[in-house]
Amino acid sequence: MSNGLRRKLTSYGDQGFSLFLRKAFIKAMGYSDDALDRPIVGIANTYSDFNPCHGNVPQLIEATKRGVMLAGAMPMVFPTISIHESFASPTSMYLRNLMAMETEEMIRAQPMDAVVLIGGCDKTLPAQIMAAASSEIPAIFLPTGPMAVGHHQGERLGACTDCRRFWGRFRAGEIDEAEIAEVNNKLASSIGTCTVMGTASTMANLTEVMGLCLPRAGSAPAVESERVRLAEETGRVAARLAMDEAAPTVRDILTPQTIRNGLVALQAMGGSTNAVVHLAAITGRLGLRLDMAELDRLGRSIPLLVDLQPSGQHYMEQFHEAGGVPALLKAVRHEIDGSAATVYGRTIGEIIDDVVDEPGQTIIRTVEKPLKPIGTIAVLHGNLAPRGAVIKQSAASKDLLQHIGRAVVFDSVEDMTQRIDSDDLDVHADDVLVLRNAGPKGAPGMPEAGYLPIPRKLARLGVKDMVRISDARMSGTAFGTIILHIAPEAADGGPLAIVRTGDRIRLDVEGRRIDLDIDQAEFDRRMIDVVNRPSPAPSRGYAKLYQERVLQADEGADFDFLQSEELDAR
Ligand code: FES
């Protein structure tokens, strides 16, 4: 039997008095003793006026509460931090760990037998999974779902690959102020998360692949009734979890097999590179290391199957209509461990067995007839990335995957912003744009600045893509030949710090290499200066904590003290 309100009593030195006081206070809300004797399902409320991606959270909470009560438990809603990509300065990534800490501690501090975590915008689901992976009670997740597609002059529009595409056209002078303003009105045509295979869609789909939310909950549109019914069913499942002493926790569900299933799906769906950082943080909470070699191997053997922007053409509502995650898993069934458990009690194999093919759909391809013959993400190493880097090869220009070019170096995001559009910038189409000091510590917060804009003078000449490398991240909605997450970052002694404008950089995606083409003696000489130049830490507050304790991208940019202690022992 669950403990409900008796869990986690506040410490007054008298347990009986603690419960008496707790009940006295909560009765101010009008609860009966019957209600207060029920198992409690906590529901994390991430609604915020600053977060349109969570605009449907109030409706989802109501439906979840209904499901909890229909199943005989007691729902209790509590607020947590909410993070929207465009309303978090300096970056949403800077706040992800704060949200994970806060959510974990609120789950731990308050009396609940199970918890429903409602999230959606890029960093929220990862933060919530990190939190739940560090908690002891069962959890089930409810993504908010993707927004509806908009239209402009006969074209479909969706945030936010089209945001970048139209902004690029505006920068190149192809469209005027009036048209870009009109597009601005239409890019996000409803509440919900970005509707391409960006980070939010990727993480929602992976939450489903890893068995942490109900089937189809990863992709059902934010504004459709199916999403609300899924919320009600999520509430019912949460109530069952709350009543079952032996219910699995997130740690029980997230096994190495489950994580590997996630990597398979990531490669097949054209998922965001940000997912690699988040999965590394999540596995760190479990005492595991994300197997980057396996991720890369899967990228060679599993082709891109899903025709969604930015690697393809379509949007999340088409993916959902085509069968969503279960249909995708069926397409890669040979690589999936079907015995993987889910939080709702079935195995992933059983979900796949239930899939009824959608006749005529072309969004989710087969391995025999993929969208592209390569997987989504390749993992690179080399003298510029001793601990690794990633490229979304499915969204890169084929003719740039093997490239040698002259480096044009920007020392920071600010430096890049000030100089990139200058007519005086010495830059050519076959150069390699280098951005450094934009990693977890350098910026700080590892901004999505890796998608360096094409210098305006080249954009005007019709240049659409260049090789760009950085220790930053990139939005999952972006595209181009862009090497990201170089670790260690320049601000933490990484060799990106020694690159000089005019050096030659060699990219070999097939060989999985990214190298600075200078002789070893010169390389070593320059590195001595770097390791002797530590970056300054802020003097107080969360900024100080972040700067001192954040890990590098290959470790998920989590805080070192939040990873599982077991990891240290391995
Ligand atoms: Fe929230 Fe894209 S801005 S999902």
Image (tube, rainbow, N blue to C red):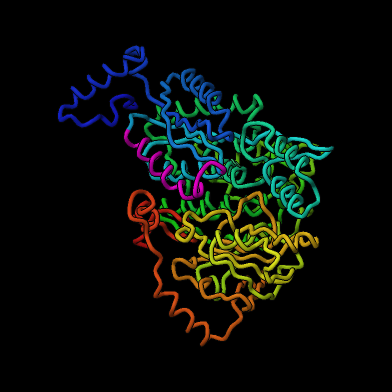
Residue 256 lies in the magenta stretch: no
Task: Tell me the quarter of the picture where residue 223 sits.
Answer: top right
Whether residue 545 is situated above or below residue 391 in the rendered picture = above
Q: Quadrant of ligand 1?
A: top right
The residue furthest left is 13
Instruction: Specify the segment rendered in magenta.
Output: 86-109
Q: Position of residue 480 (x, y in %)?
A: 70, 59
Please name the residue shown 84% across and 37% down the image.
154
Magenta span: helix, strand or loop, mainly? helix
Residue sitting nearer the eye, 511 or 420: 420
Give the image location of residue 32, x and y in percent. Answer: 34, 12
Foreground pick, 298 / 53: 53
Q: Quadrant of residue 391?
A: bottom right
Q: Quick check: 523 left or right of 248? A: right
Q: Position of residue 296 (x, y in %)?
A: 60, 63
User: Where is 332 relative to 41, above or below?
Assistant: below
Q: Is residue 187 left or right of residue 210?
A: right
Residue for point 59% across, 43% down: 200
Residue located at (67% from left, 49% from top): 269
| Residue 478 pos. (x, y %) | 67, 52
